[in-house]
Image (cartoon, coloured by chain):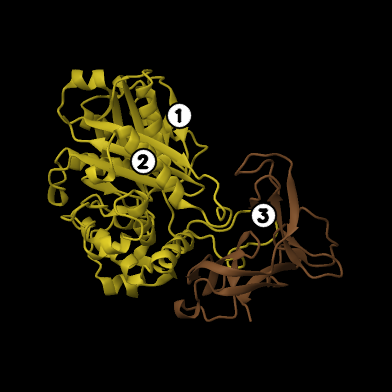
Amino acid sequence: MSEKVESSGPLPAVPYIKLPEGADPYLEGQKCSSCGAMYLGQRMACGKCFSRDKFEAVKLSDHGTLHVFSIVHRSFPGVEVPFVSAIVDLEGGGTVKGNLVGVDPTPDSVELGMPVEVFFDDAGRKDSDGNSYVSYFFRPAA
Amino acid sequence: MGDVYIQGVDMIRFGRFPDRSLTSLGAEAALLALDDAGLNMGDIQAAWCGNLGQAGGMVGQRILQEIGQTGIPVVNVANACATGATAFREAWMGVKAGLYDVVLAVGVEQMGRGLLGGAGGSKGISKEGLLGSGIMPCVFAEAGVEHTRSYGTTFEQFAQVSVKNHHHSTMNSKAMYQKETPLEDVMGAEMISYPNTKLMCSVNVDGAAAAVLVSEKKARELGSGRAVKVRASALTSDPYSDRDLVMPDINTCTRNAAAVAYEMAGVGPDDLDLVELHDCFATAEILHYENLGLCKDGDAGRLIDEGETALGGRIPVNVSGGLLSKGHPLGATGIANIYEVSTHLRGEAGARQVEGARLGLTHVIGLGSACAIHVLEKPA
């Protein structure tokens, strides 16, 4: 993990989940200052314009629209199915992948382009050392 | 610079061979290709071997230990599902550069059953089913749903790809499956990742394919009348795109490779008589109709509806049965596609022969990403 977190508290499921003390969790992007390309995680240089050392950490929006999805009925052993795998374009830039919850996992219940919001919750799984994790999820925006 | 020719090419029947070694499968394909070329290992000046599962295992050298150790340069190649085609292309480059007159390209794979892919092996907890899914049926389902989003492509249209390719495979004795799958069977099969049902996912099989490539000078000297001309070889990786971090862009690298290949061959998609493209999932085939320029953007659904890509149609696609039915042994697939198109160009494809085939295209794509395209021409 890229950040030190107190061992007693839950850890972020991926490094771009930020868990500030006394504030709401959020997703962090790395924005290229030269061309505006948005990344999840650090880069040596921008994949789009090649500029170096010019990334700005930005707080990504917790609102976006559903770009595409699939409904996964078979996954690796131990993974609960079915679930909606969703790719969401966030307002203001950044695309993230996650589970869409709060809808029936059927094609008719999921609408392409629907507005969604990002929320954070316990990941529901622990690592081999017993640590808990916080992950992000999508749900239909009110 | 002279042209490069495929003097010999063949594949073993794809299937499951748990009792055989990986190298014996590769060796068998290599010997078949050498026999087809009328040459032997003593004639081969360099070899390239494509394999993923044992990428660190010097598979090419081990194959030569089974069929002839002459001390030639051997290079082992890994490039995801484009592995076999990349080995072929590297061999092509060796001849094209004028370094060699006769070279060998082998692709071989032994696969387990089950799902490929999944979120990477970083520390902490598994992300599969937590942050969406990284399994291949889902990744390609999401790519297909993007086409639905743009053009309204339906589940049924995606499923028709499987109906067509499974039908084609009934005429190919080297395919893993040779079984008709009516539309209701395809759509009613176990849903793996919507809209890909089990019958819309390629088959994990063992397999091997090989090709002997020669220089123009050597082809003329051998004068077999069966040498297939390599009109173009193109390889691309994925350029930057906004969603590439979470959604592999299989479209742009294919479009870029197609542009390079058509330019190099001096032909366009309308000049092609058949295509073997990377139908790892039924959804993918629809996207590649447009990526390869077989129709204009948005027309792929109509193409499958009207049977234009079926044997006997305007531009037959995957008459071998495709990865969906012939099987998809990752390292072998790219060369097996080249075998299929070459066989048609030689007029030797039997019941599934595309009549009068003069020019064909092969396409594979490996996620990560790598796209390889070859344009092949009928023996003069």
Which amino acid type is marked by label 3? Leu
Subunit ID for the residue under disc 1: B
Name the one closer to the observer, A57 or A74. Answer: A57
Q: Quick one: quadrant of the N terminus of chain B?
A: top left
Q: Are marks 1 and 3 in contact (CB under 8 Å)?
A: no
Residue B12 at least partly seen? no
Label disc, if present, on residue B373 of the rendered structure:
2
Q: Residue at x 58, y 69 (%)?
A: A65
Q: Quick one: quadrant of the C terminus of chain B?
A: top left
Q: State how far apart marks 2 and 3 are (Cα).
A: 31 Å
Q: Secondary structure at mark 2?
A: strand
Where does label 3 land, which residue?
A40
Where does label 1 land, which residue?
B75
Q: With B282 as the anchor, is A100 left or right in this view?
A: right
Q: Position of residue A40 (x, y in %)?
A: 67, 54
Which amino acid type is marked by label 2? Ile
Which amino acid type is marked by label 1? Val
Q: Position of residue B231 (x, y in %)?
A: 28, 32
Both on one chain, marks 2 and 3? no
Subunit ID for the residue under disc 3: A
Query: Picture quarter containing residue B131?
Result: bottom right
Colour of chain A as rendered: brown
Q: How many marks?
A: 3
Colour of chain B as rendered: yellow
Q: Residue at x 84, y 62 (%)?
A: A7
Structural crowding at the residue carrying mark 1, measured as other residues with C-alpha within 10 Å and reported as few (<14), some (14–19) or many (≥20): some
Q: Position of residue B216 (x, y in %)?
A: 25, 21
Residue B253 at least partly seen? yes
Query: Picture quarter containing residue B20?
Result: top left
Q: With A31 as the anchor, is B3 left or right in this view?
A: left
Q: With A121 as the anchor, is B171 left or right in this view?
A: left
Q: Residue at x 30, y 49 (%)?
A: B14
